Amino acid sequence: MRSVAYGFFAVIALSGAVYMAQAGGRADDKASPIFGIKIPAGYRDWKLISVAHEEGNLNDIRAILGNDIAIKAYREEKLLFPDGTIIARLAWSYVPSEENNKVFGRPQSFVAGSATNVQFMVKDSKKYAATGGWGFAQFKDGKPDLTAALTTCFPCHEPVKARDFVFTRYAP
Amino acid sequence: MRSVAYGFFAVIALSGAVYMAQAGGRADDKASPIFGIKIPAGYRDWKLISVAHEEGNLNDIRAILGNDIAIKAYREEKLLFPDGTIIARLAWSYVPSEENNKVFGRPQSFVAGSATNVQFMVKDSKKYAATGGWGFAQFKDGKPDLTAALTTCFPCHEPVKARDFVFTRYAP
């Protein structure tokens, strides 16, 4: 089941370049299904939690940002994350940089290409009680992804229940 | 010459875990040699420019952050970058995540481990006129790196003179 779901995500992630408004991320009125989440204003300006790279079908490089409530909770190592926490996962295609490689004198440099999609985890312990207090959303090109893409979010986050269902650790 | 210099950088980068104060990065009174740059207060909270991965001896995953002047210049596609611009390159060891891989069902996930070092480019067109208007600094564990590590900064940035000596492009 999960591999099928990831395949689906990967198709979305790889299907092309995405335009995002540069200042703060594009706002959009359309809410994501199931959890009713809209793109939070200004998320592109949020502080950095960490970075990661996914190989395989995703083949992306990503940054995980947090709103002020999220950053404060991380730094205080507070669990559970308080209501109002929003964690944003931005991802871009994983692109070798010929320009950088020339300077390094070897193929070693990979940079962010076009945006693939953006995901959000929103903490509301009452509203999202059935999914550990978290609502999940995914947007591509400012538009929410289908319900099917969201049904797998919570099951995949369950293995890290001990960290309030959040995979990403704060980068020192 | 350059490969030797990168080897030197790599030794620094790989020589162990680094403690950084969590809130805003550690401030330190010691200035970096040659350019006299100190760690800018609060740089860990700056906005994200982009992310990258370097293979080879560096073997890191990195985030490039900018102060408000830098971010504004990027978004307005302003060249040259104005005086006062500071670009920060944070890097962490590149670590496979067994935890994530279990969920994905395959080895594909790489995350940020311990901090390696932090670099800064500071724009001051008068003070740093001899190096394209940029001063360069590198800190490890809050302490400035040696003069030798800085002599190669500008020569390596010269190939991107057309972009005001800055490699990193803004991630959409």
Image (cartoon, coloured by chain):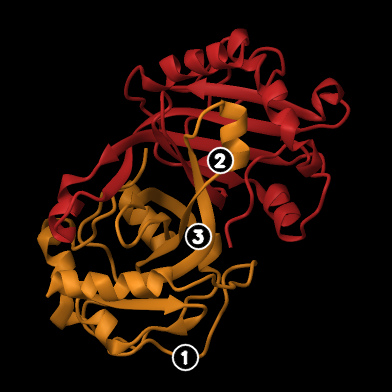
Chain colours: A orange, B red
Chain of the residue on which disc 3 is drawn: A
Q: CA distance from mark 2 to mark 3?
A: 13 Å
Q: CA distance from mark 2 to mark 1?
A: 34 Å
Q: CA distance from mark 3 to mark 1?
A: 21 Å
Say if mark 3 contacts mark 1, CB within 8 Å: no
On the image, numbered disc 3 is attached to which residue? A46
- Residue A38 as seen in the image, left or right of residue B164: left
Say if mark 2 contacts mark 1, CB within 8 Å: no
Instruction: Compare marks 3 and 1 and give the one earlier in the sequence.
Output: 1
Q: Residue at image x 59%, y 68%?
A: A24
Nearer to us in this view, B23 or B99: B99
Q: Residue at image x 41%, y 23%?
A: B57
Query: Which quadrant of the structure image shows residue A38?
Result: bottom left
Disc 3 residue type (three-letter): Trp
Disc 2 residue type (three-letter): Tyr
Nearer to us in this view, B61 or A100: A100
Residue A40 at x, y percent in the picture: 48, 76
Chain of the residue on which disc 1 is drawn: A
